[in-house]
């Protein structure tokens, strides 16, 4: 999956079968706040949302940032992936 980071638009995106899925965020100092994860139903059920959220967490980890999940999907993803607990903002 070719996930693209678009920092100027504060999002990670992927184009699959002609449909765009995205994970939006905003920066608050050294915290990356995940505000929305959206995957069109036409490409749902493939783990794309999880891949997008993971890309955001990996980006934050690589750049010394913390992550605050603010959308329900990202919250649930973080709970299922305790190996990323070190990146969570308190």
Image (cartoon, grey):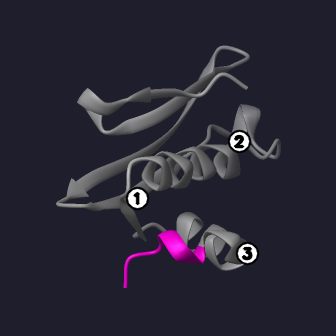
Q: Magenta stretch containing residue 17, yes or no?
A: no
Indicate the position of residue 4 as horizontal and vertical percent values.
51, 25
Write the residue at 23% across / 54% down. 27
Left or right of 4 in this view: 40: right
Q: Residue furthest top?
A: 18
Residue under label 2? 48
Above or below 38: residue 75:
below
| Local secondary structure at mark 3 | helix
| Local secondary structure at mark 2 | helix
Are circles 1 and 2 on residues that touch, CB within 8 Å? no
The span from disc 3 to disc 1 (Cα, nearest Å) is 16 Å
Above or below 61: residue 73:
below
Left or right of 88 in this view: 50: right
Q: Residue furthest bottom?
A: 90
Residue under label 1? 34
The span from disc 1 to disc 2 (Cα, nearest Å) is 15 Å
Above or below 32: residue 55:
above
Crowd tier of the residue under label 3, counting other residues whose Cα lies within 10 Å: few below 14, some 14–19, many 20 or above: few
From the image, which quarter does the N terminus lie in? top right
Q: How many marks?
A: 3
| Local secondary structure at mark 1 | strand
Write the residue at 38% across / 66% down. 66
- When asked about the image quadrant of residue 8, the answer is top left
- Residue 76, disc: none
- Residue 80, disc: 3
Are circles 2 and 3 on residues that touch, CB within 8 Å? no
């Amino acid at each position: 999956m070719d996930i693209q980071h678009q920092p100027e638009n504060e999002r990670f995106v992927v184009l699959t079968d002609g449909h765009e899925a995205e994970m939006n965020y905003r920066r608050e100092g050294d915290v990356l706040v995940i505000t929305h994860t959206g995957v069109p139903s036409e490409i749902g059920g493939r783990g794309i949302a999880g891949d997008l959220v993971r890309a955001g967490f990996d980006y934050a980890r690589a750049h010394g940032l913390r992550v605050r999940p603010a959308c329900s999907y990202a919250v649930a993803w973080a709970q299922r992936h305790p190996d990323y607990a070190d990146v969570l903002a308190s």
